[in-house]
Image: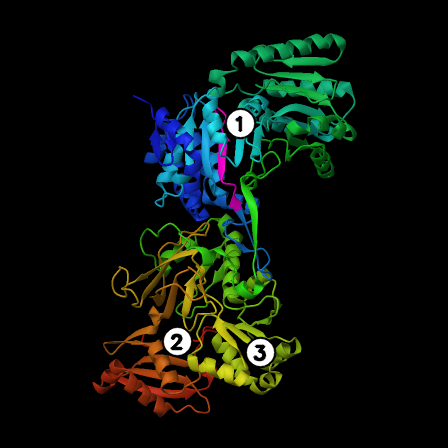
Amino acid sequence: MSVHHHYWQGSFVGDEEAGRRLAELPAAVEAALATELETETVLAACEALSAALCDPGHAVHGRLAAHLPEGEDPAVLAELGALLGRRELTRKLRRELGDTAPGRLNRADPRETVYEAWAPVGLVAHIAPGNAASVAPMSIIEGLLAGNVNILKTSSADTLLTQHLMAELAALDPSGALAARIVVLRFPSSRQEWLRLMCAPADAVAVWGGEGAVEGVAAHVPAGCRLVEWGHRISFAYLTSDAWSDAVTLGALADDVCLLEQQACSSPQVVYLDTEDEGEVFAFAERFAAVLAARPPAVGAASTDGPDPAEAAELTTTELMARLEEHLGLTRVFAAPDGSWRVMADTRSPLTASPLHRSVWVKPLPRKRMIATLRPMRRYLQTAGLAGSRTDIAELSRTALAAGVTRVTPVGAMLESYAGEPHDGVYALQRYSRRVAVQADPALFATTACLDDLARPVVLPPPAGPLLGKEDVQEPARRVARADAELYFRSGGSTGAPALSVFSYDDYDTQMHAAARGLLAAGYDPVGDRTANLFYCGAMYGSFISFFSVLERLGGVQLPLSAGPDHRATARALIDHGADTLFGMPSYLWQLLHAEKEALRAYGGLRKVFYGGEHFTPEQQRTLKDTFGIEVIRSITYGSTDLGPLGYQCTESTGGVHHLHADLHTMEILDLAEDRPAAPGETGRLVFSTHARRGQQLGRYMIGDLGREVPGRCPCGRHAPRFELRGRTGDVMRVATYFLNHRRFLDLAGENGGHLGELQVRLDAGDARERLTVRVERTGATDPERLREVFLAGYPELRSAVAERLLDLVVEAVDGAALDRSPTSGKLLAVVDARR
């Protein structure tokens, strides 16, 4: 019976089946590339696998531990899990490809209709090294993050860890997109026909190993295919005179030597001293030998296995040759009696590879000769560990980089790394990607920020878990890790006490770019529009700051005025600086425009209004257009303080209709009374799950808004789902046994009563019955009695409550300034319930 030690696109197969599929590899690759792979799909699966690998009690951890090499510490799974966390991978994406969704064709410059993205090269063939448990799976993860199909060869001596690890990862993706892009084969390098079949259709071949391994694979790499070499490298430490006499520095250097027994490419093989004095070289070698002698012996796999016969022979030969040259005055050797370490001082400067296993060369190299000495070995150089003064470090870093070094660290940190760090002088994700561009007709694509919105819907992992309310989100927000809590906002408090929201700067940046794309869709022109930012600012309220950031990312002209009480000064600034576009809350903009009506009408330069936080009624919009000549009035965004931008309007959107920011969130619309999907077209509770967020899990969050699905594809051509806002759950009042809705009062006042201003409902508990007061902004045509008749005639439930003497209904006209508002955001409080 054939042993199924190959993993092929979701299943384990034997040699015969793997050979058959290899012959058909080009067709399999084409089929896989025809389907889309969202970056979020990779991140979500990796995040789930990371949690399992970091939990020794998890079933996945147990299954994978069984496939570790003999003697391998199971802690390696937790180390691999740490590399797969969302924080590390999103940081890697941002560093290497500039975005957490690098495959989307967004505008390279918001002011131009040129779209750029990172596209996969296609098929990446990975030739993994033996005995390096984390290298093979991480190589595939890098290929997946770039969107590629990946086929990987492991050594015939390796266990099936990589195969089973990839199977566990693919199982965490219900869409099957990951499985379609992963093939892991185990066969010896002598099986040249399989190696040829792997490489023939590849667009990039990544090889891990020495020159021999690279040469063996290069013969099979077709013309035009990108060969990515991750070969062996040599690293060294460089110490100035101040540093080499410092005991702390010597201890740190010993740490670099002993950690991993010099098996890492970043381990120091040579210690260079900034001197020409041979005596100083010999004296340092003797002092450093004493430090190594005090170090405990190697533990774990290194001490169990020790050098293999070939390595032991190299160690012996290198030491004997160095001892022979002592008679010529060229060298001096300090070594442990048991051969566990050796320090070999050499008066000649050229770089010499170490036989490893705590074997270190010490050589003189004045900084003025560093480039000339090291540059001939530039193909092999990797890390330089530097020790010296601040000025020395700055100067020597530049010199070492000029000599060919790709990485500089402090001594003692040569083996440390950070998420997204370049490897051997390049970013892996860029080597596995192509930078692509589309130039489009500005007349046709003026409001299109992302070409993919017109091409295909975004498919994110489905929401899961319990429904969350504001309190469920608020308590975890107070416990967010400090590294993820870099920016603090409070909500406006228009529907309750202000709530705290925290963001990492990376998440904030992602959301501001999304809001900027939505604003372009709504008709904002970053080239021609001159914008006054009139949102409220201060008290940790986020609107003004957020839209400042949005305009900054769009490159739009901005007057950062903020909402202020001096309407005359604000109007003068608009006129003096030629503003034609206003950003702000409807209630504030309404007050400003009417307070300075004559001056702004005479100015005649206002053309666009983008509003947020509240709504303009249809009657108000007609007034703004007729009175002030405003041509465009649209929502600037639909969002919340804790979730960020949720929806945007396009040029085809009217009223409360918005597109979902489908690259950030998934949306559900649940029945008003039961936790099940609302019937198609029916109003329900809006529930959002955000995916592009670090530090906070905001899944299935009921934000308190009501809405209904808008079926069909929008005439604008975008695939993003549409929904219509239908008020807030807090706007639905239970009064006198009836449920009454603030939006119904607003619609009746505008459509049937001709009311143009704001409207607020106040509830009071009377002696005999409850009292409902509709407070309307006083305008020239306001008639409270007429509006009372409109409400009773058009609202049957209200009419019944009044007729049954369960409710007193009062309509009163007041100045707009007398209406109750949120002190933070300036939002009108739609319902003021004074019964409590």
Query: Is 632 one of the magenta-colored residues?
Result: no
Q: Amino acid at mark 1?
A: His
- The colour scheme is rainbow
Q: Quadrant of residue 759?
A: bottom left
The residue under label 1 is 220
**Spatial separation of the CA atoms under disc 2 and disc 3:** 28 Å
**Residue 128 rendering spot, x and y as whole percentages:** 49, 28
- Nearer-N-terminus badge (2/1): 1
Q: Amino acid at mark 2?
A: Ala
Measured in 3D between alpha carbons, the distance from the residue under mark 2 to the one under mark 1, in whole angstroms, is 71 Å
Quarter where residue 281 is shown: top right
| Number of numbered tags placed on the structure image | 3
In this picture, residue 359 sits left or right of residue 753: right
N-terminal of the pair, mark 1 or mark 3, is: 1
| Real-space Cα separation, disc 1 to disc 3, in angstroms | 66 Å
Mark 2: few/some/many CA within 10 Å (<14, 14-19, 20+): many
